Image (cartoon, grey):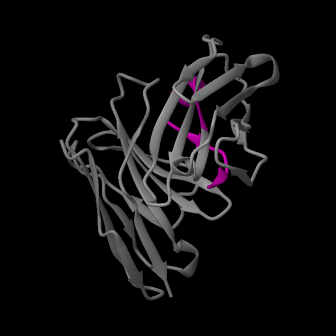
Amino acid sequence: AQKVTQAQTEISVVEKEDVTLDCVYETRDTTYYLFWYKQPPSGELVFLIRRNSFDEQNEISGRYSWNFQKSTSSFNFTITASQVVDSAVYFCALSEEGTGFQKLVFGTGTRLLVSP
Amino acid sequence: NAGVTQTPKFQVLKTGQSMTLQCAQDMNHEYMSWYRQDPGMGLRLIHYSVGAGITDQGEVPNGYNVSRSTTEDFPLRLLSAAPSQTSVYFCASRSTGQVNYEQYFGPGTRLTVT
């Protein structure tokens, strides 16, 4: 069965601090996809990144970076030099081949508060 | 393109009332789905559809009905609303040919059942 765990319910940082959001997943499949979404206070869901199970390369996009490690079943998300606009709830999600990629399972989310 | 649209944005129902949450997309996506978001529980899949005339249950389907008569529309029906259905509902879509691509989400409908 697929499962996504985001153990950090809420994180508070001061602007310019670096912050890492943890995501641990469980799946029996060898082919799967991982995603991160951002939900700002306005409520919409914004796609940030996807990663397939065969690509363990880390990814950097501006101040955002992602560390995918199959050995620990983790797909962590780091924001460098955080800004107030980064304040949001961040969700990690998993889609696996066993469900035909038809079901996206979300973690419970991590609320990030960045204060000036 | 408008993307994924949902109506209404807000709704208050009394227990036992029925209503339909509307979802439409103009991207010609075959796959559409409904999620509910509750505090501390993330988003959970209610129902999904891989094309017109084809629907299937997700993780929390009880109390909800769906149908898919066109590619564009995927309405979610509450036949007899219960307070436990108070939630924020999101509709999403993607192309079935791009299983590794992200789903596009609508802006959400906030439903309160009293």
In front: B49, or A82? A82
Please, is residue B13 above or below residue A11 in the view?
below
Viewed as shown, does residue A37 lie left or right of B9?
Answer: right
Asked whether the viewer can see residue A101, the reply is: no
Which residue is pictured at 58% across the width and 18% down the height? A59
Which residue is pictured at 60% across the width and 38% down the height? A93
Residue A88 in the magenta stretch? The answer is no
Please, is residue A35 above or below residue B98 in the view?
below
What residue range appears in magenta?
A93-116
Which quadrant of the view contains residue B27? top left
In front: B96, or A45? A45
Which residue is pictured at 73% across the width and 52% down the height? A11
Q: Quadrant of the N terminus of chain B?
A: top left
In front: A63, or B86? A63
In front: B91, or A16? A16
Asked whether the viewer can see residue A7, the reply is: yes
Which quadrant of the view contains residue A42? bottom left
> Percent x, y for residue A106?
61, 44
Residue A104 in the magenta stretch? The answer is yes
Please, is residue A57 above or below residue A23 in the view?
above
